[in-house]
Amino acid sequence: MTASPATCRLRPLSAAHVVNRLRDLSPRERLLALVFVAALLFAPVSSAVRLHDTWLPAGDNALIELRARDVATARTPLVGQPSTSGRYGKDRRNANHPGPIEFFLLAPAVRVFGGSAGMLATAAAITGTAVFISAWAVFRQLGRRAGLAAGVALAAVMWTAGGAAMVNPISSSIAGFPLLCSAVLVWCLLCGDVRVFPLACATMSFTAQQHLSVLPSAAVLSVVGAVGRPLSLSPRGVWGGGGRDREVRGRL
């Protein structure tokens, strides 16, 4: 007995495992999605453009620019910015923030466009990417209306946060929206969407490297993702209906 093509394709056992894909949208819906994405990205882009003529790297931001220029040289940074941790404990020495990933992301734009424009553009790109991924992840799990609602909520968060919070490359600010994006992606993993796992790891890696104060939240999200995901494969599962993913992969 031969299986039909329909039964040979990987397919979910329940609606809970059906994800919404952008490529499944009609041409008109794709055009509307592009307009919506442009509107969503307007806040960080407009903030970077508005600050370009008046903003210059100073203080910690000036040090960040210098370390971004050190990338791919004999002084390539291997840790993050120095912190003021010595003020809060018995050890007088200041620990560095965890990682240098922001310097590597800033380096190309800083060298091409200069310190001010390069840093603002990169920070706007980081915020815009985090916001877009968050809205897309909600759409992927819950559909068009929920994705639209998530986008509106994210736009409200951006506008109320202010322009400086969206495009300031300082490590204590730039981690905010990526942390929110990491939380949304961990939620997707718990819902059974294993395909976002590499994206969740990349977003969490960037977030955790930015600032010592972000580490507790990043650690909690990492533990929830690492522990909750295997539990969702157990017979009872995280939400009481686990085991489906193994059944889905076994049915071809």
Image: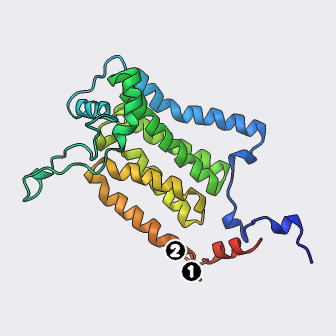
Indicate left or right for 61 with 44 as reference. Answer: left
Residue drawn at x 35%, y 21% is: 114
Q: Residue furthest bottom?
A: 235
Which one is in front, 242 or 230?
A: 230
Q: How far is disc 1 from disc 2 in space, using C-alphas?
A: 7 Å
In this figure, which residue is indicated by the disc labeled 2?
230
Q: Which quadrant of the view contains residue 33?
A: top right
**Residue at (67, 58) in percent of width and height:** 19
Residue 82: give x, y in percent of width and height: 19, 44
Local crowd size for mark 1, using a 10 Å CA cut-off: few (<14), some (14–19), many (≥20): some
- The mark total stands at 2
Residue type at mark 2: give it: Pro
Q: Farthest residue to the right: give it.
A: 1
Vertically, is 25 above or below 195?
A: above
Q: Residue 71 carries which label?
A: none
Q: In which quarter of the image is the C terminus?
A: bottom right
Residue 80 image-quadrant placement:
top left
- Residue marked by disc 1: 234
**Residue furthest to the top:** 53
Q: Do the residues labelled 1 and 2 touch (CB within 8 Å)?
A: yes
> In the rendered image, which quarter contains the N terminus?
bottom right
* Direction from residue 17 to residue 46 in the image, left or right: left
Q: Which residue is drawn at 61% across and 36% down?
A: 36
Label 2's element?
helix
Q: Where is residue 208 in the image (x, y as percent from the top left)?
A: 35, 53
